[in-house]
Image (cartoon, rainbow, N blue to C red):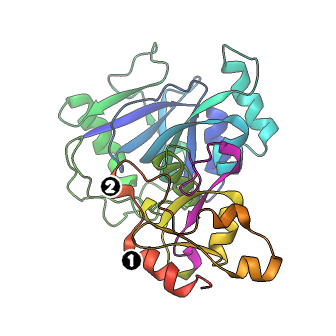
């Protein structure tokens, strides 16, 4: 099995270690991803910067992408490891080579994060070199990787939201057999709202499913079955929509059939005597669908929305 040991900003770690959160944005000042083709659920460990040479926590990898700094704040908020956009900007801008314009940052989303008390940190991880800037991939098939995993695997449990973690806590599920890198993982991380938004945004190539609009700041990840109504945060329960269509979809004035055809309610015309820009799309197929079939909208959920929410 492979896992990543990432160089971690100490201020980011300290800020998040005092909060109970379901996911974090492990940002990078560079838009270059930390690694490629990592499976969802891959363990990710935090290697603190000097003066520490310790592993202090970790989480499960969910997704990676890039976002303008202001949108990263909008999506993740304090999950960025800062209390405000200004504070986040102060952390990132000094690390950027190009300081002109709004920076585009790398976003690596981790779920089920945990932050250990200092007495439980793992000092001097074997195989680590001081010259490493971003991180290193380890394998349990090698002695160094097996040593680290043997010390840290017990903290990858289902109840990792309580921080800081005491070392003697025994979590359920931590002894599950782990697969090789690239195969489906047995641990399925719990996705949060921020993970959902980032994954839906990239699944739809950053374009509105209905209109094809690609102005990122007006695009929103919509739940097909609302999260408050037994919906989930997985990609198949979402579509990327322009903000006005998101509102119309949520109140049932727009829907999408299981055949991926757009439906616009006559109530828009009846109530506001308008809506020409919307009726042009009525009975038209979706403009954008995810390239991966496994990420496309679930047809049963679309049917639920069409039957239960659409104001026909």
* Residue 294 x/y as whole percent: 32, 57
Residue sitting at x 50%, y 86% = 307
- Asked whether, in this view, residue 303 is left or right of residue 198, the answer is left
Question: Which span of residues is magenta-colored?
Answer: 207-228
Q: Which of marks 2 and 1 is nearer the N terminus?
A: 2
Question: Compared to 308, does 186 lie above or below?
Answer: above
Quadrant housing residue 308: bottom right
- Asked whether, in this view, residue 29 is left or right of residue 292, the answer is right
Q: What element carries label 2?
A: helix
Question: Compared to 4, does 226 lie above or below?
Answer: below
Q: Which of 95 and 229 is in front in this view?
A: 229
Residue 261: numbered disc: none
Specify few, some or many for label 1: CA neighbours under 10 Å numbering under 14, 14-19, or 20 or more: few
Residue sitting at x 56%, y 54% = 197
Q: Is mark 1 on a helix, strand or loop?
A: helix
Quadrant housing residue 82: top right
* Residue 37 x/y as whole percent: 33, 36
Q: Disc 2 marks which residue?
A: 293
Residue 300: numbered disc: 1
- Asked whether, in this view, residue 93 is left or right of residue 171, the answer is right
Specify few, some or many for label 2: CA neighbours under 10 Å numbering under 14, 14-19, or 20 or more: few
* Residue 192 x/y as whole percent: 53, 60
């Amino acid at each position: 099995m492979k896992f990543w040991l990432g160089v971690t900003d100490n201020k980011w770690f300290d800020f998040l270690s005092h909060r109970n959160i379901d996911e974090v944005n492990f940002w990078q000042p560079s838009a270059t991803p930390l690694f490629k083709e990592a499976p969802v659920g891959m363990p990710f460990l935090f290697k603190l910067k000097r003066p520490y040479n310790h592993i202090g926590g970790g989480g499960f990898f969910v997704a990676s992408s890039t976002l303008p700094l202001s949108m990263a704040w909008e999506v993740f908020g304090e999950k960025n490891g800062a209390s405000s956009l200004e504070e986040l900007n102060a952390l990132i801008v000094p690390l950027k080579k190009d300081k002109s314009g709004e920076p585009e940052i790398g976003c690596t989303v981790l779920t089920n994060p945990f932050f250990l008390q200092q007495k439980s940190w793992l000092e001097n991880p074997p195989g680590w070199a001081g010259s490493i800037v971003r991180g290193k991939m380890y394998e349990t098939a090698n002695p160094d990787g097996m040593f680290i995993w043997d010390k840290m695997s017990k903290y990858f449990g289902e109840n990792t939201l309580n921080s800081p973690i005491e070392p003697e806590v025994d979590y359920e599920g931590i002894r599950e057999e782990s697969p090789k890198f690239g195969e489906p993982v047995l641990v399925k991380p719990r996705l949060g709202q921020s993970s959902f938004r980032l994954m839906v945004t990239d699944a739809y190539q950053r374009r509105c499913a209905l209109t094809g609009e690609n102005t990122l700041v007006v695009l929103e990840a919509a739940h097909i079955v609302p999260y408050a109504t037994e919906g989930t945060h997985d990609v198949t329960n979402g579509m990327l929509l322009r903000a006005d269509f998101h509102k119309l979809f949520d109140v049932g004035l727009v829907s999408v059939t299981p055949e991926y055809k757009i439906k616009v309610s006559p109530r828009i015309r009846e109530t506001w005597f308008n809506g020409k820009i919307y009726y042009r799309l009525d009975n038209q197929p979706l403009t954008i669908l995810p390239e991966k079939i496994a990420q496309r909208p679930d047809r049963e959920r679309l049917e639920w929305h069409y039957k239960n929410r659409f104001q026909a």
